[in-house]
Image (cartoon, coloured by chain):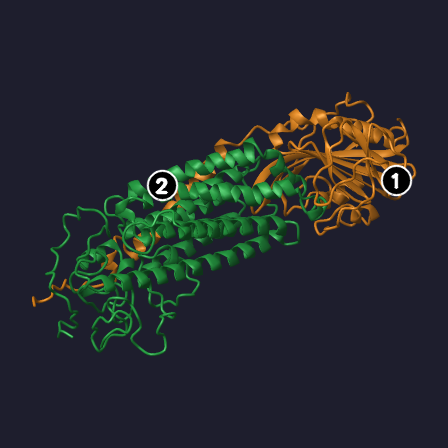
Chain colours: A orange, B green
Amino acid sequence: MSAPQTTPPVRSTEEYFNNSRLRVIGLILAATVAVGALGGLAGVVFDPEPVSKDHVIQPGSDGETRLQPQRLGGPGSSAPHRSDLTVPYAVRVPSVSSTESPGTVGSISPGTTSSSGAATGSPAPTPGGEPTVPSGSGTATIEATGVDIYIPPGWSIYNQNENQVYFTDGDGSYSFAFSAADDPSTTAGDLITAALDNLLPPELYTQRRTSDVVTLTPFGSVVSIAAIEYEALWVDNQGSATIHGQIYLGVRQDGTVLGIEIEHMPAEEFADSVEEMYPILDNSFGRFAGLS
Amino acid sequence: MACPTCSSVNPEVATYCYRCGTTLRAGDAKRQGTYAVQSAEGVTQFAVISTVMPHTSRHSADNYRWAMILAGTLILATTALGLLPIAIAAAAFLVPLAYLVYIDDVNLWEEAPTAVVVGLFIATGALAVLISMFFFEWVFDGQWASFVGGTRARGGISSMSFSALLIFAVLLPVVAEVAKNLFAVLLASRPEFDDMIDGLTFGVAAGTAYAAFETCVVYSSVFTAQDFRTTDGISTWLVVVANVMVVKSLIYGTATGIAVASYSGKGEGYDGFTPAYFANFGLAVVANVAYWLGVRLLAYVPFGNALGLIWGFLILIALVIKIRMMLQVALLEAAVEAAAKGDGSDDRRSTYVETYCPECENLLLTNASFCIVCGTSVRSSSVRARRAMGMPAVPAGVGAAPPDTPALPPAEEDAPQADGGAEQ
């Protein structure tokens, strides 16, 4: 039997590897910093032009009256906050903890206007949030107040309950209407300010920029109406998206409040899609004010 | 002493059989306690680094742990400062970059690592970009928008679109898993990369590359948003960055690693598209689907993103333990089969000369597949260590050994020797 060959012992098992401890740590840290720097560079290079903020309209004017351009504020919210407000309405808008099941109340009425909360035979939202597709334009009635919401042709309701209705065009545009009873002396601007964090929770809608609250001209039975425009970076564990939208809120002389949010993702396409959403505001607020 | 499993004669001092790794001490006959890749750890221990980087030793694995901890802390600090473009990019590529350093460190596949792994990264990354653009931007953007428009702030889970859930939590993971496997399997089918650990390495590399490039697409709005720095929702972003940096990347990597490792198989030559491969491919798909279903559904409850992170972590634990059990069984069974076939002198996966264990620095016997003291498999050693053992760096299947491979020992040397020692 031949003697076994034996390799000389190594001084340390580090000799079995190409890199020392410091080199491994240094390489990984350096590579991480380099890639982070590239990401930072991309964040600067791809910084887009700000989306035009002159989209706030005067509801009831058929979308013809475009208000003065508004400038969105910086990160966070430049809208005046009144955290001391005790507006009952503020607790009725959906909150981040809302996990209500879809109501079976309310309905969508293609081509008709329902004056009550009773179903009119049109398709109701299906459980699980699958949208119902009206053949043409129609209305959805918010049961709590009997307010009718205009649903444009091609849009579908994906969720509805006693106070709210949610609808979409399935192509990135969303609208959310809500209604409740309140004090008629409350101003719409105050309500928007109080409800903003419920409508756009900061933990989901980051980098939130809002315009100042714009006070619009009351019309019909609406005694106070206001709007705000916003842009934000929505995020969850699967991805993120820029969104741009507006919130309109009106108070009727009987104390009924109607709020409508229109929104589009991605933000840079808002200008192209907003014309499609103006009829929601005009028709819904027109009916709310008793003009149609 | 004779091994009860393979009958090889071991030195009396041996704790593990040098040929098949069987425990020669009472109490753990099936060797369920110590991990054959890194004997200081248990088989079912949740240890990420030694699992996805099996060629590291106990000491060198610490290098990566420290590097990952330091880099991860740096990234989370950047996130806390609201510098999202920097944080997302660095988080997306942290694991793939660490993996590239690892492959260079252990000099895997000799001169090939850069070309092989960078090529795999780029090819899989390109597929990831295409698939992500297809799903998130080109075809299903409306369905994706439904998650944005129907968050828990907008009616809760009742506003969720079931079709969107199916597309992004079921269909996308299936398509993505096929893409992750594609180039990794192609490489694993080459004779010079047919070891199960090679398959695992390719799978992890492809999976983490896919995760990195997908992250760049799905979080591209971070780079194009109005603000470079954010002050809102920092807690949410910390969770998201931690998810992208660790959980998502490693779930993708380990799941694909399991599938491609089973393509390679436990012995010499690759097994190919066997039922075992399809079963493990199915497991990888199920893990990804379960992960994304959980993430999507939990997004509708309070603290949903944090709960999604925890859910992903649980899946990662299961995948890591699955890999460890898979490698343990493969290394032991392959060694038993090799021992049954011959004396080991022609086994290209065992030592040719006496040398020293990279793990415990005790003597490794000639023709050994395991250290008799710590039980570590020599197949999990780095290429430099293999060279010191007289093993060809390329494990099997190729005709030409590297030019500096030492001369083979005499074929008639059929019994192990210990401590310079006496034949048993």
Position of A112 with respect to A136 (left or right) is: right
**Numbered disc 1: secondary structure:** loop
Residue B257 location in percent, x, y?
A: 40, 51
Residue A180 location in percent, x, y?
A: 84, 43
Against B268, is A238 above or below? above
Work out whether disc 1 and disc 2 sit on a shared chain: no
Please state the chain letter of the residue tagged with numbered disc 1 in the rendered image: A
Q: Quadrant of residue A60?
A: top right
Q: Nearer the viewer, residue B48 or A157?
A: A157
Q: Nearer the viewer, residue B288 or A237?
A: B288
Please state the chain letter of the residue tagged with numbered disc 2 in the rendered image: B
Residue A118: mark in rendering: 1
Against B408, is A289 above or below? above
Give the spatial CA distance, label 1 vs label 2. Answer: 61 Å
Name the residue type under label 2: Leu
Residue under the image location 55 percent in, 54 percent down? B309
Other residues around mark 1 within 10 Å, as few (<14) / some (14–19) / many (≥20):
some
Q: Nearer the viewer, residue B179 or A146?
A: B179
Other residues around mark 2 within 10 Å, as few (<14) / some (14–19) / many (≥20):
many
Residue A130: mark in rendering: none
Q: Nearer the viewer, residue B346 or B420?
A: B346
Residue with the most extreme right position: A254
Q: Is residue B62 visible?
A: no
**Numbered disc 2: secondary structure:** helix
Residue A17 location in percent, x, y?
A: 26, 55
On-image quarter of the C terminus of chain A: top right
Instruction: Give the residue number, with chain letter if any, for mark 2.
Output: B120
On-image quarter of the N terminus of chain A: bottom left
Q: Is residue A271 visible?
A: yes
Residue under the image location 75 percent in, 49 percent down? A101
Residue with the most extreme top position: A64
